[in-house]
Amino acid sequence: MTEVPTISELIHHIKRCPAEFLAAPIRRGKGEVNSEALVNDVLRRLLQQSTAPGKAMLTADRRSAAELLLIQICCWILTHPFFAKIDNGWFNEVFWSQLATVAPHVKSELWITDEQRAEELARMILKCSGYVPAGETPDEALDRFDAVNTVKRIKVIEETAAAEERAKLLRRQMAEQRAREAANVYGRE
Amino acid sequence: MMKPVAVLSDNERFPLLEDLGFLKELRQDSSAPIFNFGSGDRLTSEKLEQVNAYAGRARAQQFWQKDSLPDWMPEFLCWCRATVPAYRSYQPEFLQMPSLRREQIAGRPWKYVSDECDPDDMLVYNTSGSTGAPMDVMFDAVSQACWIAQLEAILAADGISLEGGAGRVSICLVCNQESTLTYASLSTYLRGAGILKINLNPADWRKPEDRIDYLQKYDPEILTGDPFTFLTLAEMKPQIKPKALVSSAMTLQEGLRRRLEKQFGCPVYDIYSLTECRMIGVARQAGVYRLIRPDLYVEILHADKDEPMPIGERGEITVTGGINPFLPLIRYRTGDYGYLRHDGDVPCLYDLAGRAPVVFIGGDGSFVNNVDISRAMCEFMLAGFKLHQGRDRKVEFVGWGSAAEEDIRNVLTQIFGSSSQLEVTIEAAASGEGKKVSYSSEFTEADIKK
Amino acid sequence: MADTVVTVNRLKKNWAEAWQQAVAIWSPYVTLREPTWCMSAQDAQLEGLTGSFAMIRLTDHRVVIDLDSVCRHRVGDCAVQILAHEIGHHVLIPANRYDNVGLFRRMRLALAGIEDRTPLVANLYSDLVINDTLQRIHQLDMASVYRKIQQNAKIESTLHIWYMRTYEYLWGLPRGDLSGGKQTAQLDADASLAASLIRSYARNWLDGAGRFAMLAYPYLIEDAQHNKARQELARYLDAEKSGAGAEVVGGMAEIDESILDGIVDPRAEALGKSSDSSDNAADDEKTGRRPEISDMRSLQGGTGPQKRYSEPGTYIDMMRQVDPAADENKLIIRYYREIAMPHLVPFPEEESAPLADLLPEGTDQWEPGDPVEELDWFETTVMSPVVVPGVTTRSRVYTQDTDTPSKAQPYNLYVGIDCSGSMRNPRYNFSWPICAASIITLSALRAGAKVMSCLSGEPGSFLESDGFVTSEYDTMLVLTSYLGTGYAYGIPRLQTPYLDKPKSKTHLLIVSDDDIFAMLDARAPNGELNYDVAEKALVRAGGGGTLVLHSRPHYSAGGVSRLEKMGWKIHYVTKEEELVAFARAFSRKFYDRTGKRQ
């Protein structure tokens, strides 16, 4: 049986991401790393087909730098030995494309420096691979992923932020106006 | 007295008035009271236009038909659901909408402010409330100034109009308290007319005689105040010729009304109003409050259920609408009880009384309606009274004003029965406390002999 | 009963042993006295400790522990964690009175409208920073302490749930481990943001304070929620009053513009685009609608000269929150003094003799924020070889030598200020007339003159100092009070016995507006026309008179020429701001260096 790593082990792995994976992706002729080539290198390694032609097409120019950087970071994560041992059917373009939703909400360096974001990434990848982290039940794993899920969090904030901001503004104005003279009172209530 | 600490300049108080000479005159007059505050109406030209537009609608006095909702209702509800956070989740159908109580608003008043409101227009008035907890009521300069337009609509029914203009004091709010904010101000809507808020307490004046001199000199068109204050004022016998007296804050007893009308030679209006929505109705005679706000829909709801009472049946007075975008009301329970009946085209409130009916028990164990007591007391020259019944059926009555204890005892004996034990006290009008008429009882509905 | 005493005594022994261990976790150089151990709730109450089992005082660098309460909360075996936590308040956050005020200052801006909640939020924030540092860096098991206390706790208020949920995020604890069972998606989102924030700002915690308070805001906006949260969290509140009883921290009237950038709602930041700066702006996808962020500058309400100062109401409120025992009068005087200071005349230098010789009296605590020149390095080094600002630093205290050499007396000063309905309350809104009067008064006192101050709003009321005084406090106390009655300065005030036969020549200074002419036209209580009162007072005072009017010259030309014929100087300001320039010029004319008229 394949031994699934714990979340903290994966987080530890993510935090050790080498600088090469964090270099600027090449877009429109500028940048240092060819993200597509990196993805295909990782793919070849995992499939143990060192000479196979590239399987993934990223069309880097149509993606944001944030997304490409996240893709690069995921490439590093997949170098963890665990991923070489498991089935890799999930490891296709659908996986790479789903990173576009979350990438714009997080500063790229936070994926590896911020504990929570690293956890989010670790959980996301494990979930995609269909495994539950060691020491957790499927329900726990799902709840913990929910708890750090950026897309979900942003949605909640979007739903409530404007109303809260308005309430705050009025509350502050009330406090100010309470101390201030109001306007003519003509009769008694 | 809570005195706001941040004050405005006169130019901020009256953005549209160029000449503030009359204001200075009112403040610097040799018989002027020691004013302790300043105030203005804060009307800009845009806001003044809104007040004028409202005045036009108020004058028309077009009410909703019996058994139907006002024409403006669908649009108003739509607007509330679209722009007021607290109403956003409401069902579209008016009769499906839940009623609202004071406590709900008091905890989070900002949720009742329309998104369309500019916070810079906000004014705050703290109401201690004769019933319930203190509450901050938000409003704007327009809804505040519209009080005058509502008053004009009341006066117009009797062919009275306000003259206004610089040099004339149009409204004088008279108080008689230990301490209160007092000021001389102007009304932009009334073209620079004077507005006064004065306190009859001699401590507020340089000489006690100044109170009469000042009032006589500026002879306000309208005096507003509560019944207690009017009684004190009447006893001072100022030679003034107001066009009307406007009494509010507590029910005006019929005897006092007659005296005031006779002494000042003008109509005396008893206003039913709330801080949350200002004026609701006016009574020219005891017990019947004619509604005066076509923009404020009034319905009578069951005390415990959000169901309208059948026409003519008593329940809680509930209001919807109003012109305050900082507190648009949907089915707001006023805490007052009465029943509603159309009198021609105008809806009227009858048997108005604060809170749920209080249960009194007669000598034979039967239920005594406090409305009967209120009616009977109209005959006396009382500014107010307090009536309490204990578990032993003993009735304690305290009245404020001038009436013979013996006469009151006779009337109460008729109501409660000859076997009832009565204790009647009459005190000077000035010693009255709180709300003008108060009933309390240690009995509940369970005690009524069927 | 006897059992309890035995238990508490044993606890004291254990905890006293744990103290040095707890200190060493932070730094062996920290020199804090052993805590005050309270053996009973009554003892604790005497120390001002109620609600919680521990508290800290920045003023005397104390930790107070209620061992009886420790027992009741069953955390007797958590000595090291709890003591290390309390020490954390002294060495990490808020650490000293100056940073404590800084913390409050930032949080108050974020909690606009509900500033009264600041001490609570500041305490929770400090605790999070300290506990996370202890748990993560110093490997102390803080979670177990919280688990114990939370076990039977009531966790109903959303603030409480959010706060505890934040710990769960920080320490990777299972959902509900500390926060009970009532989380929502929104609480999750906000706790997640809070946890990230605590980590990011652990070292620069002052910069994260505003953001944290912004996150807490929705959970405190309603009074009822706030009260409930306070009740539930009372046992954790150990630092709310840590600044009590201290001298007023200086320099707080002036606005610190640099703190505004930190008054940001992390929710708004989260919605804003956070992608790399290397991205071309043109490439960026449409960002989500960003919630309107209130205009922070207007929140700060810059006022006074160069709009550099907070409103006095805000200042007093804040300082009293830091120290609830602070005297409001002292604070408002401090406020106007701070603003007046740059405009004062220099101390007299003639014959190189200061007004009074300053004699060293002893030393006192020196804290960050106190003037650097007052820091006594010698005494500080004697105290400890390792300098910890606010802990080991000492300042020298001087006393005035009462044996002042005699010298030529400058003119005494009578300041009469219009405090009628048209004047603002100087305790709530910055007042230009009071600022100007402060500059002149403090300059006069510096020069050795005596000052009588009078506020008057008449008809109505007045307030004046007890004759001509040399006390800064007495004269400033009058100036910074408020009446708000009547319409002008009451000319009959000039009939005060103190101006009847003044011992030395006195200059009369009156600040009012155009309404003074209505006052001059009226009669004094003795029937005299006020114009005559003004004329006679001027003659008797013997040092001239200046009437400063916020008005325009042509408004009351007749009255003006009448006053000028008497010898009154009339000075007009068309904007109140000009009063400061006037005050500077006036002070220099009358009180610069020699103290004599130039």
Image: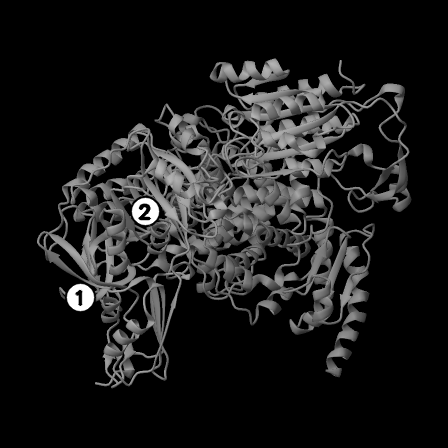
Answer few, some or many: residues within 10 Å of disc 2's Cα (few below 14, many 20 plus, some between 14 and 19).
Answer: many
Left or right of residue C411, residue C406 in this image: right
Left or right of residue C210, residue B185 in this image: left
Can you say whether B315 is above or below C320 in the image?
A: below
Marking on residue B309? 1
Of residue C103 and residue A61, the one placed in the foreground of this image is: C103
Residue B313 in which image quadrant = bottom left
What chain does mark 2 sit on?
Answer: B
Q: Looking at the image, is mark 1 or mark 2 nearer the viewer?
A: 2
Q: Horizontal and vertical percent for residue B315?
A: 22, 66
The answer to whether the residue labelled 1 contacts the one labelled 2, judged by CB atoms less than 8 Å apart, is no
Can you say whether A126 is above or below B117 in the image?
A: below
Sequence-first tag of 1 and 2: 2
The residue beneath circle 2 is: B224
Q: Horizontal and vertical percent for residue C196?
A: 55, 48
Q: Residue at x 24, y 73 (%)?
A: B369
Q: Quadrant of the C terminus of chain C?
A: top right
Q: Horizontal and vertical percent for residue B112?
A: 34, 49
Amino acid type at circle 2 is Thr
Can you say whether C135 is above or below C41 in the image?
A: above
- Callout 1: helix, strand or loop? loop
- Callout 2: helix, strand or loop? strand
Task: Identify the colour scheme used.
Answer: one colour
Count the marks: how many? 2
Work out which residue is located at the far front of the displayed protein and give it. Answer: C527
Q: Quadrant of the N terminus of chain C?
A: bottom right
Answer few, some or many: residues within 10 Å of disc 1's Cα (few below 14, many 20 plus, some between 14 and 19).
Answer: some
Does the rendering let one see residue B154? Answer: yes
